[in-house]
Structure formats: structure tokens, C-alpha cells
Amino acid sequence: MANERLRAAISAKGETIQTLADHVGIDPKSVERWISKDRTPHRNHRWKAANFLGSDEVYLWPTVEKQVETASASELITYYPHRGAVPASLWSHLIEQATSQIEILVYAGLFLFDGHPDLPNQLAEKAQRGAHLRILLGDPDSEMVHQRGEEEGIGDDLAARARITRRYLQPAATTPGVEIRLHDTILYNSIYRFDDDILVNPHVLGAPAGQNPVLHFRYLPGARTFRHYMRSFDYAWERGTPVAP
């Protein structure tokens, strides 16, 4: 039985068996077998193919759904009822232990810099050691930040907080490896990624971010939750405006 979903996804993206094979790094005959014989590829090949086609691996290969569901449930480390319940020691541990990637998506995130006054210098030092840092702050002049401020009942104070955070980041902004962008997206979740750990702070309409729950996930091969949130981060990143050092 042929994999018509995969065949259609390749066609919809304007790609070919050859271009997909080239991207994944395999022989085109392997891709042909994925389609004609409905073969399920190796996990890494599935991820590369699904990302290249802008699709979900479970949609393209439904037989892996149970495996992905089990792994994804295991990614959840714990749940905190509000951001203040996240131990200060956890934030410090995640920041200190990160060696390769730190990625932050917020409107302001001022609490993190107020609580860790040395954070800008820490970020600069990590970048100097080879870490890649991407930070997305809300554009204080955007309609989305203004609207969020009104919804939280703090008006222009949210935009002011975003400006303060950007000022705090100045010591790190000129360091190679540290990238800062402004965004004007509707922010459904604040995201804090430290290597394989990610803290997700959902936004609840009418409530400040600090009053909303926080979910702690840790990446597991074969799972989708961690990668799902990071695709959201990438979506906002691609639409952000780079901040000049």
C-alpha cells in the first residue's frame, strides 16, 4: 500500500523525490520505497523529511503515533500553577548548565533579568564559549504589545518593561553568538529554552504572565512536544526584526 500522504506532501511543496533525498542525505530509492511500499524511515530521517516538507511526522507516517505519544508524555517533567512557583534555584541551574543553546521568547521577561542581575554577562560569556543565543522581545511600539498591556490591566507599562529588558541586554548585545530580535506576534506562550530543557509559560487572557502556569519539558528523541514549541519559536524568530548591536 502506497504512502499517498507523503507523495502529496512532496508535490504540494513543489519538491521531488530527488530533492527530498538530497535534503535528508539518502539515496532516492529509499524515498521511493517510503512511498511505494509505505516504509517507515529511521527517526532522524523522518524528522528531516517532515521539517523539509513543512508537515508532521505522525501525519506522514501514522504508524509512529503511539511511539510519539508515549515519548511526548514522558517529556513533561513537572507543572507549576504559576510562574512564581518555579523555584529560583531551577532558573539559576538551567542558566548555569546551558552550554549550547539559550532561546527566549517573551514580550518583556523583565522578572528574569531582575532576578538574575548578572544574566547579561552570563549570556555574553556563554556565547564567547560557543553557545548560540536567540532572544525575542516584544516590540514596545507594536500594537500587539499595547493590546497585551491593556488585557493585563497595566497599559503602557508592558512596553516600558520591554524597553528596560532590552537595555539590560546591552552588555550581551555586541557579543558574537548573541542575537536579539523584536517581534509583534500574538504571544500565546512565553518560551525559555536552555539546551534540552524548556519552560513554557502559557498566556491566559486577562491575566499577567506571572499568574499563569509554567510547564517544564525535557527533550526526548522520538517525542514531539519540545520540538513543537521550538517550531513556534522559529515561526516568531523568522518574523522578528533584528536589533543592531
Image (tube, grey):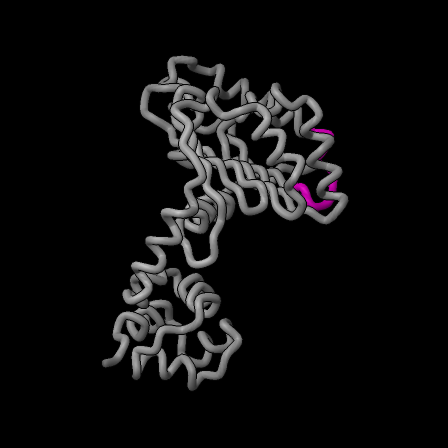
Instruction: Look at the image and tell me whether residue 235 can be seen.
Output: no
Image position, residue 20 (x, y; %): 44, 74
125 left or right of 48 in image? right
123 in the magenta segment = no
Q: Nearer the viewer, residue 104 or 160?
A: 104
Image position, residue 127 (x, y; %): 71, 43
Q: Is residue 130 above or below residue 171?
A: below
Image position, residue 84 (x, y; %): 48, 20
Quadrant holding the C terminus:
top right
174 in the magenta segment = yes
The residue sitting at 35% across, 53% down in the picture is 70
Q: Is residue 45 above or below residue 66?
A: below
The residue sitting at 69% across, 45% down in the picture is 177
Image position, residue 212 (x, y; %): 39, 24
Instruction: Look at the image and tell me whether residue 73 can be seen.
Output: yes
Q: Given the current orientation, which residue lies at the most extreme bottom position? A: 29
Question: In this picture, which residue range is highlighted in magenta?
Answer: 170-178
56 left or right of 221 in image? left
Q: Nearer the viewer, residue 236 or 98?
A: 98
167 left or right of 129 in image? left
